[in-house]
Image: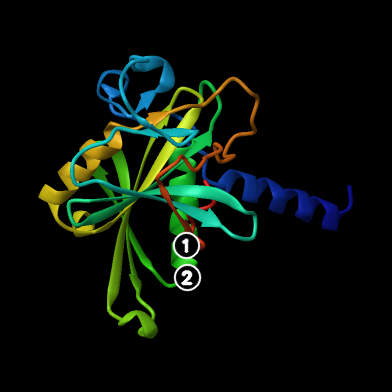
Amino acid sequence: MSEAEQRGADEVELREESAPELDDSKSAPDDRAEAGPFDASEVPAMRPYVDLGGIKVAPREGLQLRLEVDERANRVVAVSLEYAESLLQVQAFAAPKTTGLWNGVRAELIQQMGAQGASTAEESGPLGPELLVRSQAPAEQGGGTRVARFVAVDGPRWMLRGVIMGKAAVDAEAREQVVDLFRELVVVRGEQPMPPSELLPLKVPAGVQAQRQAPQDGAQQA
């Protein structure tokens, strides 16, 4: 091996040694199976839910529900729940059986949001690690600081991710109500094989409004 080849091999080895090890462990509350968010196999078939395909929502007083539609792909990409002066936008993704997605996705979000000029801070919450993101709102939207809180739970062969905005993003009491709403959600993974991080299909049921617009930054990718 020439000196140049040896230097190249040393550089590759150094990069491999310095690369952070990917944490693919599952991130979920210890009582997830009992307190949610639930897998479809964990809830009674008789309990009423709004069936949105990959996600089922438990109806409750004061809850407003709409679906976000990506016009380019002509498909539903997220469920938005307005509750307690807050907005919770949720998506469910396919995941491996024994490993989780949230730890890796969180690292990607930190990099992505930082590249867009937002500040990020990891915090510990009732669901596990959370990501608090502060960004500058566009002038045409009134300017100021926009705050969003990313949460997620790794379940059996799925990850449910939520973006909390509005009052619950900064107010602990309001956030407790929104987390309770998040934990009532049911994920329907299905038996069909899907690659990890693929969005579980969502559908528009009768009586639910579909909002035809692109979701907020980072909403379409796990």
**Which is more foreground, mark 2 or mark 1?**
1
Which residue is tagged 2?
116
172 sits left or right of 77 in the view: left
Q: Residue furthest right?
A: 1
x 59%, y 39%: residue: 198
Q: Quadrant of residue 206?
A: top left
Taking the view exactly as shown, the residue that stands out farthest to the bottom is 139
Mark 2 or 1 closer to N-term?
2
Residue type at mark 1 is Asp
Residue 70 coordinates in the image, percent (x, y): 56, 57
Q: How is the image coloured?
A: rainbow
Q: Is residue 221 above or below residue 36?
A: below
Cα separation, mark 2 vs mark 1, equals: 10 Å
Q: Residues within 10 Å of mark 1 (few under 14, many from 20)?
A: few
User: Residue at label 1?
Assistant: 217
Between 214 and 46, the one nearer to me in the picture:
46
Q: Residue furthest front?
A: 207
Q: Secondary structure at mark 1?
A: loop
- Above or below, 128 against 209 in this view is above
Are there few (<14), some (14-19), or many (20+) residues within 10 Å of tag 2?
A: few
